[in-house]
Image: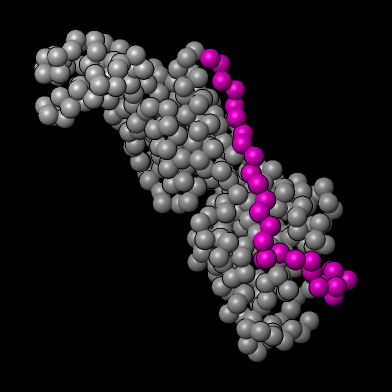
Amino acid sequence: MSDVAALAGVSHQTVSRVLNDHPSVRPETRERVLSAIAELGYRRNSAARALVTRRSGALGVLTTASADHGPTSTLLGLESAAREVGYYVSVAAIDRFDAGTMRAALDHFLDQAVEGIAIIAPQVDVAEAVTAFAAPVPVVTVTSGAHVAGPGRVVAVGVDQREGARAATRHLVDLGHREVVHLAGPQDWFDAQERLAGWREACAAAGVAAPDPVEVDWSAESGYREGLRLVDAGLPTAVLAANDQLALGLLRAFWERGVRVPQDVSVVGFDDEAGAAYFVPPLTTVRQDFPALGRSAIDALVRALAGEDVPRTLLPATLVPRASTAAPRPSATSRPARAREVTTRGPEEPEVSES
């Protein structure tokens, strides 16, 4: 910095003001300093600056080693929100959440002098590890789990998955469906637990049938297999899938068997992932605002760094109605659901015989 000051013919303090974008520097002086910086190839020593200011400008983000839509979108939202407020993030993706792995991740972050840590905690084992996660910096967990807590300064933010599933189920009930089948995600995930609970609550409140949920993984392949099984076992009038990939698999299976969506069965997904509006038909789903979730998590960390008490935050999930849902055919609601055999004549018109 002294070399820059000498070349630009200014004081050390002026160089510091330019680097920190202080408004009191004249434009011509700022330009001279920036030219000197470019000529010398100067870069600030972040480690030295952190020792002086006790601020590193870094946040740690601990996430699962998963390519699933929710955790990945949450990570992207966090990183973008951190940059908006002048932080960069250091990411550690791990596939085991035992004490040793968590301690190694914590040491990795502390070696980089992070000011706070965000933990994307969608699964039960992650949350259990958080309860033993004693960090000397503020920690925010990004989770829909209702009771995720830990020692020290741990706060939680998430999306209201339960209300999202309730809204999706109510949408189907309001259309006239008297039975809603739920294709549930893996129950070691908080999101899947909350969506299942919301579906059950909405069905109970409306007095409609809620058959035993079918637990599968998050993949389109699982949705496809279950779609074929539903056709063979007796097609319901409405299915709530725990995510959009499961819904995509359902749509493929129904199309192959000549089952029309939404004329024969309505399908709702969850997440509103990129491309959901271009499924055939466009998918009714529940949208999570991942950029807003990232901003909420970073805001919670910044407030915790300032010494504030930060309450748990749940952001709303929004129903997005599209063409994959409609009122059931009159014949489908005139009597209880019964097993059906479906003989495919073609993608336009299946022949249905009831037994």
Which residue appears at 11% of the width and 14% of the height? 6
Can residue 324 be seen in this snapshot? yes
Which residue appears at 42% of the width and 42% of the height? 76
> In the current view of this chain or complex, which residue is farthest to the bottom?
345
**Is 349 in the magenta?**
no
On screen, residue 8 above or below 241: above
Q: Quadrant of the N terminus?
A: top left
Can residue 268 be seen in this snapshot? no
Which residue appears at 73% of the width and 73% of the height? 263
Q: Quadrant of the C terminus?
A: bottom right
On screen, residue 190 above or below 136: below
On screen, residue 255 above or below 272: below
Residue 321, x across and y down, in percent: 69, 57
Residue 255 lies left or right of residue 93; in this view the side is right
Residue 42 lies left or right of residue 134; in this view the side is left
User: How many badges with numbers are in the image?
Assistant: 0
> In the current view of this chain or complex, which residue is farthest to the front?
28
Residue 261, x across and y down, in percent: 67, 72
Q: How is the image coloured?
A: one colour
On screen, residue 304 above or below 102: above
Residue 300 lies left or right of residue 3; in this view the side is right
Residue 280, x across and y down, in percent: 59, 70
Q: Give the magenta part as a residue range.
A: 308-337
